[in-house]
Image (tube, rainbow, N blue to C red):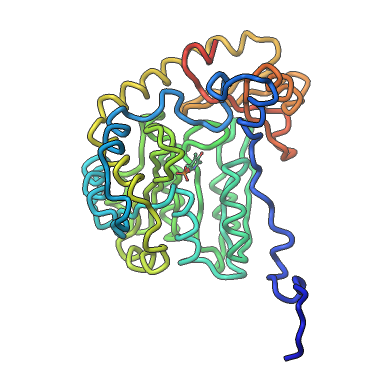
């Protein structure tokens, strides 16, 4: 070939990548703290559904004791999976641990989806799915949710065709905080397509679909340590998958996807369930208090019910971004959205009592 030292992106990069949506990065908390001249921990950071109580103290103890950072992590995270099996009540050989549950969305899509295939979901929902589907070159079919953000199963069944591989259902849904009835989930499962339930907030809703695993061969469920266990920064989540898919998923999984610190932290968390259930209880109690108080504030035209650790509010006047920017100047970070369907809303993570006040 002729010598050329320039980078011909148009020839080298996949043509469909130019149109990929960027993941909406939240404002940088440390930039804002520096701008306001306050320490980072003084910010009231309620924009990413993180756990304001932090992780279990047993995690800090375990990591302080741990001294095998020179050794590669267990590829299969066997001890974590054994403990998880007891925690969720599903067989360990159906559990795969990921670098956050986000990674497991990717793994499953890469195993199932080819360019031209369809993936069906109901929006507004977790924005990560759209990008992950686009990377596979597949069509992301986004069926609009109803007035109370309920899903339309009939529409999904009508749209599903021979190119459709799976449904992705965020349950409870982020950002609308509502649950989908089991009867609807069963109708999706009865199609025989894969149904991926993202149950990142199961601990806050007190409901989980794990019992359905024994009944359906086409169900996959994602859970995470990021929210209820306060480990968002360490990146560890897990999925319950159909047994037949597990060997295929393991072929795609990067071998050392979950680092040793995250595995130690997950084990320590699962040995301290009483503590974590206590902090989940504090968050749920504060959520109920906020659900009483927020509707009385004239700034909101509607406050939606929640069975998660966050609350979706419709802003009177409809400028979610404006409200968030105004609050950011006071050191309070909430989440706004740029999509037309969500511009009127903000999402508030339930914080500590002080933060909520
Ligand atoms: C926060 C969140 C997750 C968690 O992702 P991790 O990669 O495990 O941190 C997954 N799904 C939804 C809907 C979320 O809101």
Classify residue 329 as left or right of residue 48: right
* Image quarter (top left, top right, bottom left or bottom right) of the N terminus: bottom right
Residue 115, by quadrant, is: bottom right
Classify residue 35 as left or right of residue 87: right
Where residue 13 appears, x then y in whole percent? 69, 70
Q: Is residue 300 above or below residue 267?
A: above
Where residue 165 appears, x then y in whole percent? 51, 63
Q: Nearer the viewer, residue 196 or 212?
A: 196
Q: Is residue 222 above or below residue 18?
A: above
Classify residue 67 as left or right of residue 125: left
Q: Nearer the viewer, residue 163 or 266?
A: 266
Q: Is residue 10 above or below residue 158?
A: below
* Image quarter (top left, top right, bottom left or bottom right) of the C terminus: top right
Where residue 199 appears, x then y in whole percent? 42, 41
At a point 37% along the width and 30% down the height, the residue shown is 55
Classify residue 80 as left or right of residue 245: left
Q: Nearer the viewer, residue 92 or 152?
A: 92
At a point 70% along the width and 66% down the height, the residue shown is 16
Residue 254, by quadrant, is: bottom left
Where residue 119 appears, x then y in whole percent? 56, 58
Q: Is residue 214 above or below residue 332?
A: below
């Amino acid at each position: 070939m002729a010598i050329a030292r320039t980078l011909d992106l148009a020839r080298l990069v996949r043509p469909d990548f130019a149109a990929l949506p960027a993941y909406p990065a939240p404002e940088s908390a440390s930039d804002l703290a520096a701008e306001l001249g306050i320490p980072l921990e003084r910010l009231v950071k309620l924009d990413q559904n993180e756990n304001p109580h932090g992780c279990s103290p047993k995690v800090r103890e375990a990591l302080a004791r741990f001294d095998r950072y020179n050794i590669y992590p267990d590829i299969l995270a066997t001890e974590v999976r054994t403990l998880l099996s007891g925690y969720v009540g599903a067989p360990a050989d159906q559990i795969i641990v990921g670098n956050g549950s986000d990674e497991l969305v990717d793994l499953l899509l890469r195993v199932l989806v080819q360019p031209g295939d369809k993936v069906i979901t109901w929006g507004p929902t977790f924005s990560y799915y759209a990008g992950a589907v686009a990377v596979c070159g597949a069509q992301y079919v986004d069926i609009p949710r109803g007035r109370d953000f309920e899903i339309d199963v009939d529409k999904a069944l009508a749209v599903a065709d021979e190119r459709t591989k799976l449904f992705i259902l965020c349950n409870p849904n982020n950002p609308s905080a509502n649950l989908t009835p089991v009867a609807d989930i069963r109708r999706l499962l009865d199609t025989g397509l894969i149904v991926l339930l993202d149950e990142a907030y199961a601990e806050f809703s007190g409901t989980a679909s794990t019992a359905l695993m024994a009944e359906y061969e086409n169900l996959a469920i994602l859970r995470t340590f990021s929210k209820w266990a306060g480990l968002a920064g360490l990146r560890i989540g897990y999925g319950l998958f159909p047994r037949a898919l597990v060997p295929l998923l393991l072929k795609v999984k990067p071998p050392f996807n979950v680092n040793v610190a995250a595995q130690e932290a997950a084990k320590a968390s699962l040995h301290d369930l009483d503590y974590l259930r206590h902090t989940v209880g504090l968050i749920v109690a504060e959520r109920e208090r906020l659900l009483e108080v927020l509707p009385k504030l004239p700034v909101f035209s509607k406050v939606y019910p929640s069975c998660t650790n966050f609350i979706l509010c419709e802003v009177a006047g409809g400028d979610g971004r404006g409200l968030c920017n105004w609050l950011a100047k006071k050191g309070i970070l909430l989440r706004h959205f740029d999509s037309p369907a969500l511009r009127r809303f903000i999402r508030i993570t339930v914080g500590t009592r002080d933060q909520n006040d």
